[in-house]
Amino acid sequence: MSVRDQPVKEHRRTRQRAAVDEVLDDTTDFISAQDLHAALRARGAGVGLATVYRTLQTLADDGKVDVLRSDGGEAVYRRCVREEHHHHLVCRSCGATVEIAGPTVERWASSVAEKHGFVDVSHTLEIFGTCPRCAQA
Amino acid sequence: MSVRDQPVKEHRRTRQRAAVDEVLDDTTDFISAQDLHAALRARGAGVGLATVYRTLQTLADDGKVDVLRSDGGEAVYRRCVREEHHHHLVCRSCGATVEIAGPTVERWASSVAEKHGFVDVSHTLEIFGTCPRCAQA
DNA sequence: ATCAAGAGTGACAACCATTGTCAAAACACC
DNA sequence: GGTGTTTTGACAATGGTTGTCACTCTTGAT
Ligand SMILES: [Zn+2]
Ligand SMILES: [Zn+2]
Ligand SMILES: [Zn+2]
Ligand SMILES: [Zn+2]
């Protein structure tokens, strides 16, 4: 997404960050800061809400988690398998997420931008739908 | 974006809606509800903030305006030239917007979704960059 | 034009995600 | 252990957005 993957400043290892990591690893769907905070509580490993927000912010900055906006405009986070740039196919009903890579789209996006003289280009692309499991109703 | 363009219930014509329409027509970039509210004030045609939000919501529901989220998660609206489905190339600096149509991407998106068994599919796609005008710095 | 019914309005409160504050606690390193 | 820096967290504050509800306006019929 950014022009270049940079240094990624070192961070201290704390109980809180480990706890957040753990929840992220156990969660396959995108999750909001609020929900993550609740999940931590449920696990007994309470972490301050502000800390959850800060931690997620940091992870996002470091490219360790992907961020996108839910319908309500709430930011939701997810630890993705691929580190490289990719997109998502998300189930509107259950939240099931599939990571998508599309060289074609990447090329198309940058060519369109270039055609209009835009530089320092990035893009967002998400596909929503109802997954097979949820479809059988 | 939705599966089908539907009936679109009729709405009453009021001074407030006309005023909002006017601002939207005069604004080429995406604008937030707050900013639109301020713009209305500046024009002397004051409209309640709640009304601005409701009006934009309605317009969006009817597919009369496009909505997307700014970096800060704020919803921004724009009356686009094309009524049909399309996307945007937006300048991060000045907000200049170009409407984009991409049959290729449309096909790709639905084929990817189909491949994974997803139905009732929609997608969001926006390209961001620095426009030629803003680039010469 | 008059009128009734219901859609629309607006000032204000309420909500809620997110960020700011800052003293206390935890970490990393010597 | 000592020390300097980072991190934490309870709480306040911010800011966009929605809810409330009495009042007003548009519309369509009489
Ligand atoms: Zn599903
Ligand atoms: Zn991409
Ligand atoms: Zn520009
Ligand atoms: Zn499209």
Image (spheres, coloured by chain):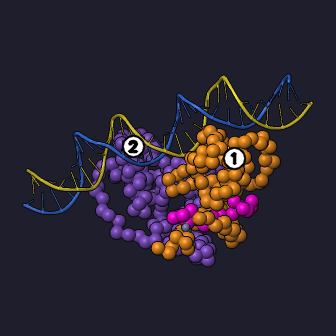
Chain colours: A orange, B purple, C yellow, D blue
- In the rendered image, residues at marks 1 and 2 fall on the same chain: no
Secondary structure mainly formed by the magenta segment: loop
Q: Amino acid at mark 1?
A: Ala
Query: Which residue is located at x 72 percent, y 53 percent?
Result: A64
Task: Between label 1 and label 2, give the one nearer the viewer.
Answer: 1
- Give the magenta part as a residue range: A80-95
Residue B30, image x, y percentages = 51, 53
Residue under the image location 35 percent in, 65 percent down: B8
The amino acid at mark 2 is Leu
Q: Which residue is mark 1?
A: A19
Q: Tell which of D16 and B43 is nearer to you.
A: D16
Q: Position of residue A104 (x, y in %)?
A: 69, 71
x and y percentages locating residue A115 in the rendered image: 66, 64
Task: Identify the residue at horizontal 49%, vertical 67% (top origin).
Answer: B1
Is residue A93 highlighted in magenta?
Answer: yes
SS at mark 1 in the image: helix
Asked if one can make out residue A126 in the rendered structure from this viewpoint, the answer is yes
- The residue singled out by tag 2 in the image is B49
Q: Is residue B36 left or right of residue A67?
A: left
Query: How far apart are the two marked residues, 1 and 2, measured between alpha carbons?
Result: 42 Å
Above or below: residue D6 compared with residue B33 = above
Q: Callout 2: 10 Å neighbours few (<14), some, many (20+)?
A: some
**Chain name for mark 2:** B
